[in-house]
Image (spheres, coloured by chain):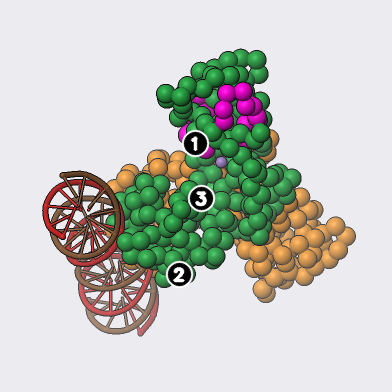
Chain colours: A orange, B green, C red, D brown
Amino acid sequence: MYSKSEENYLKAIYHLEAIAKHGVSTNAIAGEMETKPSSVTDMVKKLADKGLVNYVKYKGTTLTEKGKKAALGVVRKHRIWEVFLLETLDFQWDEVHDIAEQLEHIKSQELINRLDKFLDYPDYDPHGDPIPDKNGNIKSAEKKLLAELKKGNQGQLVGVRETSPDFLQFLDKRSIAIGSKIKVLGKEFFDGSMVIQVQGEQFFISKKIAENLYIHI
Amino acid sequence: MYSKSEENYLKAIYHLEAIAKHGVSTNAIAGEMETKPSSVTDMVKKLADKGLVNYVKYKGTTLTEKGKKAALGVVRKHRIWEVFLLETLDFQWDEVHDIAEQLEHIKSQELINRLDKFLDYPDYDPHGDPIPDKNGNIKSAEKKLLAELKKGNQGQLVGVRETSPDFLQFLDKRSIAIGSKIKVLGKEFFDGSMVIQVQGEQFFISKKIAENLYIHI
DNA sequence: ATAATTTTTTAGATAAGACTAACTTTTTAT
DNA sequence: ATAAAAAGTTAGTCTTATCTAAAAAATTAT
Ligand SMILES: [Mn+2]
Ligand SMILES: [Mn+2]
Ligand SMILES: [Mn+2]
Ligand SMILES: [Mn+2]
């Protein structure tokens, strides 16, 4: 249906739309895709020709319904493959992303639906991100960034924003995982750093760390 | 490491080498790859530059040790994925080839080794073809084409040469599967057609069918 | 041994996707 | 309001992998 490159762009735009208020900027897409802005301009024009995005020169890009559906299809594949790699093949949660990045482009609806069934229809991927169903429906649980919590608040880790091996291994070293109960023991107003308690142990974490952990209260 | 296209060429040359006595012809590769001979000439030159094939203008192409190792790596991936699709996801043996054709290009040694382990190190794929191990070692069982057998001979079906859905479904309809005991009840000298017995039932089959079934006596 | 046929290669063109450099538009700073 | 900076686009180039048409080499037939 769509090329690997087109799919990666659609996915990038989908992710960026969640944070951008208006259209997604060309530079933002270039950053996400690790390409040059000129390459992005070429591609969004092509995607616009195919009816996948609305692109207004100098203004920005948004997904059309068709584009969003296509993006959700790729996201679904990516996350289901991540579950497979972790659950079935015993990969670590910091190893699954790069391989899923390739597997998400395999062309076969039947394959992904059977995999979904084999895994017993998982709702979330190993990083706590929700898996869209066949029709693109996605359940978005209410969650907050740990950085938004105040001293004394507590909740459960339900997701991570960053999925880089460096960050995930940082968490592994401290036995912080999806499902962990986290309590904010202290918060520094100056730099947003925190002292948190996880399973009896206390850790000092920077604001940057706290901004990449999703908590359900 | 190598591009998808390069991998497909290497695999095609590997398969053709098994039947060709000398070098593999440009036209043969074009036929296997469903491309034009001019495209093949370009590619084999590129593969020769990379030390993957020996290419002599107008004479033919053969894999180098390096090329053979690379080809065996792709074949290993293809066949392991086929086993996974059949065993784990319950696909039919005529459905697995096309999907494995894509999956064989996923770049990750770790992935294929873990999949191999998960499947408990299968020796053969669903079509009876042997799966090379990590080091490219392949156990080639002695087998004959059914077409080579004489009246009265019998043996077990251990593989199929063709893997097209049409052919595999033809076998399914007659309940002929890997492992079936087949006896040659009669053979026509004129056209090589046969009457065979499989699990009590008798079938008339053309020479073309008999030439695509591998038998172990 | 020549001629005809087939196979293979070369030359030149095209499409996708990426890049650099130059130019234009928009945004920010003064 | 104007100038400077940043963001975005255009034009032209490159690589990979294809193709068609024409030319060359090898094979087969006479
Ligand atoms: Mn990807
Ligand atoms: Mn994930
Ligand atoms: Mn392939
Ligand atoms: Mn097979």
Image position of A157 (left or right of A109): right
Find residue A187 and report its image quarter: bottom right
Image coordinates of residue D8 in percent, x first then y, are 33, 64
The residues colored magenta run B149-170
Q: Is residue B198 above or below residue B144?
A: above
Give the CA separation, mark 2 to mark 3.
22 Å
For numbered disc 3, what is the local secondary structure? loop
Q: Which mark is residue B18?
A: 3
| Residue B13 seen by the camera | yes
Image coordinates of residue A117 in percent, x first then y, are 64, 34
Instruction: Give, as a three-letter code, the residue at label 2.
Output: Lys
| Residue A22 seen by the camera | no
Residue A96 on the magenta span: no
Image coordinates of residue C3 in percent, x first then y, are 11, 52
Instruction: Give, as a three-letter code, the residue at label 1.
Output: Glu
Q: Earlier in the sequence, mark 2 or mark 1?
A: 2
Find residue B39 and report its image quarter: bottom left
**Closer-to-camera residue (A2/B118):** B118
Circle 2 or circle 1, nearest the eye: 1
**Closer-to-camera residue (A93/A163):** A93
Circle 2 or circle 3, nearest the eye: 3
For numbered disc 1, what is the local secondary structure? loop
Q: Which mark is residue B50?
A: 2
Residue B167 on the magenta span: yes
Q: Residue at x 49, y 33 (%)?
A: B211
Residue labelled with disc 1: B162
Q: Residue at x 48, y 43 (%)?
A: A107
Dot 2: chain letter = B
Image position of B21 (left or right of B36): right
**Closer-to-camera residue (B105/B200):** B200
